[in-house]
Amino acid sequence: MASFQWFFFLILFLYFMSFVEQGNARFHRVFHRKKQIVNLPTVYVDPSGHGNFTTIQSAIDSVPQYNKNWICIYIKAGKYREQVRIPREKPYIYLKGEGKRKTNVTWDGHNSIASDATFISEADYTIAKSITFINSYNFPPEGNVNPMQAAVAAMISGDKSTFYRCGFLGFQDTLWDVQGRHYFKLCTIVGAVDFIFGAGQSIYERCTISTNAGGLDGLIGYITAQGRISPNDESGFVFKDSAVFGTGLTFLGRPWRDYARVLFYNTTMTNIIVPEGWAAWSFVGRENQLTFSEENCNGIGSNTTQRVSWEAKLSQQELQQLTSLSFIDNEGWIMKQPVKVL
């Protein structure tokens, strides 16, 4: 009888353990599917120590110089207090966070826009997805006691770079779109003064442009400050199928350089836009060189009856040229990326 009971309990034990092993196997399969988002060599950043690295920068530092193949740096949800830089000699890096609201990188650099941005991307072929970059020096403005000055959340100077479901949060000079061809999709950009600026050749598609100009103590903000330098310069900012809202009042933009070019296309605007729409700033008398335009926009703020007289009226051919993906990609580089954002 005792031997029979022992045998019976042995069978039950083995049966139970089979369920445990199946459960463990299923856990590892799910974990693997969650982590291996793309079929790329992947390293994992986890501040708790369960990944390959505990900081984003150390993961970037591990990538070989002049890398010729895509590598994914998977960043676990969390708050990363660090400055992150992808140097020019490290192309083909894909930063993958776990969510725009879950994975954020914060820094408060403010002494130099050239070196103190929270995120600096100098390399060609860079992708960032589901991450928010914050410059906390003046952000959020509510209750902030620091004197207002340029404090860049992201500085993008490499060519052929894509940002998908990313956030860029700041107050003045939030996103420095320095130069190169860039594609921003489903991103959120927050700021008050010149908070999207530079000479990038960029499309911002289905993006949320949120101004916190309510923190300017009654002053009017500026969304863009574009830096096109000549009629032959191909740079320009195109906001397509996007939304503009926030607090306070703001201009759509002012020129940073002589031939600034900005288009808002099929974009919803709330009543935060001042009636004039655009400011000539220090380029009064040279407004005919500027290409500031709106087309097919909607919402209270899109009323153009009181816009500046020199707002550009683009032809259908010009609109097609600027709003087509070929404006930034006539080579197919976006479709060749390991993450599909179209």
Image: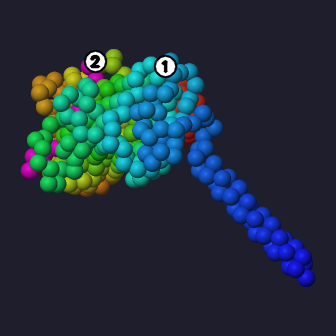
Q: How many numbered circles does the render carry?
A: 2
Image quadrant where residue 47 sits:
top left
Q: Position of residue 287 (x, y in %)?
A: 18, 27
Q: Position of residue 233 (x, y in %)?
A: 33, 19
* Farthest residue, direction front: 2
| Residue corresponding to mark 2 | 230
Residue drawn at 83 percent across, 70 percent down: 10
Of 323 and 319, nearer the camera is: 323
Instruction: Please determine whether, in this image, residue 262 is positioned above or below residue 87.
Output: below
Is residue 180 rendered magenta in the image? Answer: no
* Farthest residue, direction bottom: 1
Image quadrant where residue 224 sits:
top left
Q: Position of residue 241 (x, y in %)?
A: 40, 46
Q: Dot 1: within a 10 Å radius of its alpha carbon, few (fewer than 14), some, or many (20 or more) residues?
A: few
Is residue 225 rendered magenta in the image? Answer: yes
Segment colored magenta: 216-230
Of 127 and 268, nearer the camera is: 127
Residue drawn at 50 percent across, 26 percent down: 63
Q: Amino acid at mark 2?
A: Ser
Look at discs 1 and 2 and give the one toward the viewer.
Answer: 1
| Residue corresponding to mark 1 | 65
Q: Are marks 1 and 2 in contact (CB under 8 Å)?
A: no
The answer to whether one can see residue 328 in this image is no
Q: CA distance from mark 1 to mark 2?
A: 34 Å
Instruction: Please determine whether, in this image, residue 243 is positioned above or below residue 230.
Output: below
Of 207 and 18, nearer the camera is: 18
Q: Earlier in the sequence, mark 1 or mark 2?
A: 1
* Farthest residue, direction left: 218
Q: Amino acid at mark 1?
A: Gln
Quadrant that contains the N terminus: bottom right
Q: Secondary structure at mark 1?
A: loop
Residue drawn at 78 percent across, 70 percent down: 13
